[in-house]
Amino acid sequence: MAMKLMEGRKGQDWINLVLAICLFISPWIIGFTAETTPAWNAWIAGFVLGGLALATLSVFAEWEEWVNLVIGLWLIVSPWLLGFMASTNAMATHVVLGVLVVAASAWAVWDFRHPHAHA
């Protein structure tokens, strides 16, 4: 059962890694590289999320999931706090990926705190 639980967490870490890659490449794919603030926000947050996902793939640590959760929340509010909410593509990218990161991280924390839910 412990191995199955760890496999589930690995899945969540892979989801976060994919989301980090999507976030990092989004300025080029969605087309907002010329907009410095949202582009750099996506690159930095994507890099940090990717690093944390790679770290948790090797050894799970609950604090890393909490940091991912905070980064996801940052992505959701950053268009308003950094002033790029008028850039629809950049704003939507940050909000959607932020919601997905929050969901994956909350799921991982919930799994960690409720191991008997998998029985």
Image (cartoon, rainbow, N blue to C red):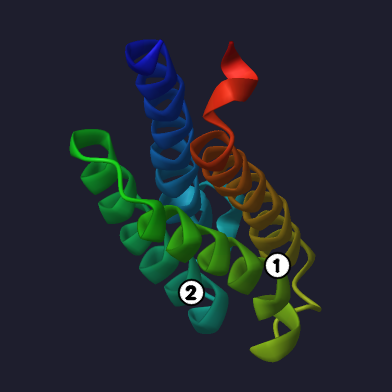
Q: Whole-Å distance between the Cαs marked 1 and 2? A: 12 Å
* Residue 82 in picture, x, y percent from top left: 64, 89
Give, as a three-letter code, the residue at label 2: Asn
Query: Compared to 23, does 91 lie above or below?
Result: below
Relative to 86, does residue 45 appear above or below in the rendering?
Answer: above
- 68 relative to 17 in the view: left or right: right
Q: Position of 51 compared to 80: left or right? A: left
Mark 2 residue element = helix
Taking the spot 54% from the left edge, 46% from the top edge, the residue there is: 109
Disc 1 marks which residue?
76
Q: 36 or 60: nearer the eye?
A: 60
Quadrant (top left/top right/bottom left/bottom right) for the N terminus? top left
Residue receiving disc 2: 41
- Seen as rendered, the residue at the extreme left is 58
Of callouts 1 and 2, the N-terminal one: 2
Residue 106: x and y in percent read: 62, 48
10 Å crowding of disc 1: few (<14), some (14-19), many (20+): many
Viewer-nearest residue: 65 or 34: 65
Task: Indicate the amino acid at tag 1.
Answer: Ile
Residue 27 percent location from the top left of the image: 50, 59
